[in-house]
Image: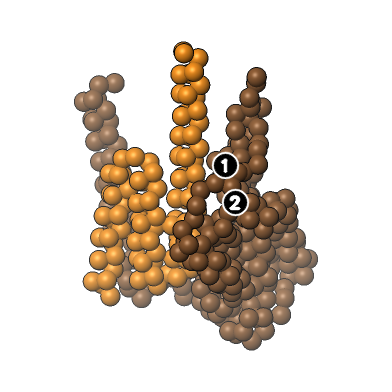
Chain colours: A brown, B orange
């Protein structure tokens, strides 16, 4: 294919997409208007279940099945990445040598921020139903926060703090608990992932029924998944070496 | 508010272009995290703090970290291969 043909094919395809996109976008409600059908339905439904954070109500109550799907995608991709990154037959794992020097300032920031980040992550997970955030966001904060121990300390310190096997179990247990809670909802309300717990007082941490519980479960799963994912990348980079045949 | 949105959108567009233009992948990893930060600002201005938090964790921390680790591993692997090839020639 010559350069000219490629350009013509691109111009044709790009032109069609551009026209279709402009037509589709011009048919949408105007940007920033108060007209919003989905909001008019989902905000009252959220308040009815005493969920202050409407986004969490959508994620874990009104469309919790979507979240179950996303959970499954997450666990599947973590398993896929871990399988690809495991040492192959001509590779061997070694102990990571203590190497390099960390700046005192970096160590200080790492050690000061480590507990702060962990507390913040727990806070974001625990208030998923009431304030912005939730299991996914808090889980990512917790998982990345743990790695400050590598930034400020050493890889062996990180390795001791996060036994990867227990995070693998957390990942799987989180996904299973989500589905189990869905089945409990099916039994008690007649709808899969139905909100069957008492709703509590709007705005309090123990309100929202199953929303807060599901948010916590997702938090556990995301921490597990992200730590397993990052640890396989770290192992490939630091510990896995080609096997010496001689 | 509209002005703020316009500024944030422009910054996102510029940062996104910078990721594409920055040629070596390790530079792209760093500019990707700058791009992520620009998106975080845009999401906050558009009053979507939930999405902003997700983007902050995934876009500015996890993805650039994974890209950097991958590049380092590949480079180390290539260097070792070249050294081995050099030894066999001697």
Q: Identify which residue is drawn at 39% across, 64% down.
A: B40
Query: In the rendered view, does B87 fall on the left or right side of A98?
Result: left
CA distance separating discs 1 and 2: 9 Å
Between B75 and B4, the residue placed more toward the observer is: B75
Query: In the rendered view, does A73 fall on the left or right side of A100?
Result: right
- The residue furthest top is B89
Q: Which residue is mark 1?
A: A238
Q: Identify which residue is drawn at 61% across, 71% down.
A: A122
Residue A145 percent across, percent down from the top left: 55, 62
| Residue A109 drawn above or below residue B80 | below
Provide the secondary structure element on which disc 1 rests: helix
Is disc 2 on the same chain as disc 1? yes
Query: In the rendered view, does A42 fall on the left or right side of A3?
Result: right
Let me know if residue A127 appears in the view.
yes
- The residue furthest left is A4
Residue A156 percent across, percent down from the top left: 63, 51
Q: Identify which residue is drawn at 34% across, 61% down.
A: B38
Provide the secondary structure element on which disc 2 rests: helix
| Residue A238 drawn above or below residue A197 | above
Quadrant placement of the N terminus of chain B: bottom left
* Residues at marks 1 and 2 touching, judged by CB atoms closer than 8 Å: yes
Q: Which residue is mark 2?
A: A155
**Circle number at residue A53:** none
Q: Identify which residue is drawn at 29% across, 65% down.
A: B8
Between A157 and A209, the residue placed more toward the observer is: A157
């Amino acid at each position: 294919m010559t350069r000219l043909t490629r350009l013509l094919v691109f111009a044709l395809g790009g032109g069609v997409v551009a026209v279709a996109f402009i037509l589709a976008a011009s048919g949408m409600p105007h940007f920033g208007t108060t007209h919003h059908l989905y909001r008019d339905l989902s905000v009252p439904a959220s308040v009815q279940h005493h969920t202050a954070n409407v986004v969490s109500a959508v994620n874990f109550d009104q469309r919790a099945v979507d979240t179950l799907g996303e959970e499954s995608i997450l666990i599947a991709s973590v398993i896929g990445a871990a399988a690809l990154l495991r040492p192959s037959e001509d590779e061997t794992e070694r102990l990571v040598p203590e190497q390099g020097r960390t700046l005192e300032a970096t160590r200080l920031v790492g050690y000061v921020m480590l507990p702060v980040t962990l507390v913040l992550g727990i806070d974001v997970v625990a208030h998923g139903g009431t304030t912005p955030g939730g299991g996914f966001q808090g889980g990512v904060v917790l998982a990345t926060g743990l790695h400050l121990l590598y930034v400020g300390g050493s890889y062996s310190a990180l390795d001791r703090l996060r036994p990867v096997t227990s995070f693998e179990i957390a990942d799987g247990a989180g996904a299973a608990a989500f589905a189990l809670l869905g089945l409990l909802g099916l039994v008690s309300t007649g709808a899969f992932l139905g909100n069957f717990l008492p709703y509590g007082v709007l705005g309090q941490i123990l309100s929202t029924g199953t929303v807060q519980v599901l948010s916590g479960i997702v938090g556990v799963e995301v921490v597990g998944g992200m730590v397993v994912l990052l640890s396989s990348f770290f192992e490939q980079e630091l510990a896995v070496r080609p096997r010496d045949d001689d | 508010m509209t002005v703020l949105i316009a500024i944030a959108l422009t910054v996102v567009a510029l940062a996104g272009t910078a990721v594409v233009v920055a040629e070596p992948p390790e530079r792209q990893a760093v500019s990707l995290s700058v791009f992520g930060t620009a998106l975080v600002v845009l999401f906050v201005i558009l009053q979507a703090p939930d999405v902003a938090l997700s983007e902050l964790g995934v876009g500015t921390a996890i993805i650039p970290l994974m890209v950097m680790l991958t590049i380092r591993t590949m480079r180390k692997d290539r260097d070792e291969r070249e050294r081995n090839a050099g030894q066999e020639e001697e």
